[in-house]
Image (spheres, rainbow, N blue to C red):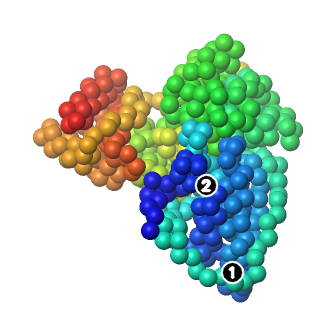
Amino acid sequence: MRDLSALIKAYDVRGVVPDQWGPELAQQAGTAFVEVLGIRSADGGAGRIVVGHDMRPTGPDLVAAFINGVTAAGVDVINIGLCSTDGLYFASGRLDIPGAMFTASHNPAEYNGIKMCRAGAAPVGQDSGLADIRTMLETEEFPAYDGPVGTATEQDMLVDYSKHLRALVPLEGIRELSVVIDTGNGMGGFTVPAVLGGQVLDPLPLQIDEMYFELDGSFPNHEANPIDPENLRDLQKRVIELGADIGLAFDGDADRCFVVDEKGEIVDPSTLTSLIATRELAKQPGSTIIHNLITSKAVPEIVKEHGGVPVRTRVGHSFIKATMAETGAIFGGEHSGHFYFRDFWKADSGMLAAMHALAALGETADGTTLSTLLTPFSRYVSSGEINTKVSDAKAVSANIEKIFAAKGAQFDHLDGLTVTGPNWWFNVRASNTEPLLRLNVEGDDAAAMELIRDEVLALMKDEI
């Protein structure tokens, strides 16, 4: 039996092509997807799925192989071709069928992967089918099927996707804005012109300066990973050079969005979470807002102040989406730049988050800057996520807890270890795939944050 633990992660399939996987495994994955999700209908009908891919050169061959596996198992495929991950979620939601997106998100060029969902963009993760798919692929034991094969057709859904987003966040009436957008040679270069640039719909009052819009899976300019500040340097510089009102950055598959203000300063995703939450609560007062435990404590404060109900979850889209379904939440935000919308099938969309930022700024009076608009939402100082290699993550976490217990700190273990003091909190979480501890610290001011950050980092490094 082969071991695919390095390839099939908690939420998706992701690895180096061809070293870790290729068309043969992709075809088997198509068959396993059909069997585990039970996509063939009970009355013998074919059932359908939707498939899309990003700009990586290996995508078309992997998709073709996956489609062969699906159709051989008796299921029809709608291939929407090039798309962002939220474009695939849109297709799954609109068509109400399962979907598979071929992407490795922000990973380097040699990677590719598959993000899978059930009908209505419901997530497929370790606890919702992915573990069973992995077992089937590792054992290479597939149920016999001798019925009719499925068909494969192509369908363009970019216009419908664009119209849906425009309806959710209308931008036609805002004041004119100067916007710099860095898509990092990823799928934002495909979706931004359609949604914001007037390529398929009427133009908006946006003067867009395009950075790295050419689709290029080799990422010649910088990694398509905006959570790393190094990959935002070009955007920050360009915003300042042009005197632009706002800068936007998307990751490789465009399901995440980061924002830069008119000063070239990076906007904390927690700040954007708070802003979007207030806008959604204005439309649906008293609703529930989801935030993961790494977001700023300003988020639940602001949600409550605006009459909403904040609910705290573990890190990860499957937990966010499940909690949204349980609570009927209208919106959810994560520290990593993922933003989830009930009206988008509870799925994450970097484009919708960007549109909310544009709408919020564009609805203000002339001369109002983004930094001024966001001041009420940015209350504390955070460290950002710091990764440290350790040989024994459990032992290090236990030692940290012991030391801070002696200081009278409070703890919880919802996801890793969260420690709370009088004017600070921090969380340490072990990576699922690497010998790393991830540290996030927040303080009431820079001095409080830095003091605790340095103390915890010293405890981590002393372990090695």
Q: Which residue is mark 2?
A: 22
Question: Label 2 neighbourhood size at 10 Å, few (<14), some (14-19), many (20+)?
Answer: some
Residue 366 vs residue 192, the one in the foreground: 192
Picture layout, residue 100 above or below residue 396: below
Q: In which quadrant of the rendered view does residue 34 lie? A: bottom right
Residue 277 shows up from this direction: no
Q: Is residue 391 shown left or right of residue 128?
A: left
- The residue located at (54%, 49%) in the rendering is 19
- Which label number is shown at residue 41? 1
Mark 1 or mark 2, which is nearer the start of the sequence? 2
Picture layout, residue 44 above or below residue 294: below
- The residue located at (77%, 59%) in the rendering is 79
Secondary structure beneath label 1 = loop
Q: Amino acid at mark 2?
A: Gly
The picture places residue 124, in percent across and down from the top left corner, at: 55, 63
Residue 66 shows up from this direction: yes
The picture places residue 296, in percent across and down from the top left corner, at: 42, 38
The picture places residue 59, in percent across and down from the top left corner, at: 68, 49
- The residue located at (43%, 30%) in the rendering is 379
Q: Amino acid at mark 1?
A: Ser
Q: Residue furthest top?
A: 241
Residue 22 vs residue 235, the one in the foreground: 22
Q: Is residue 289 shown left or right of residue 357?
A: left
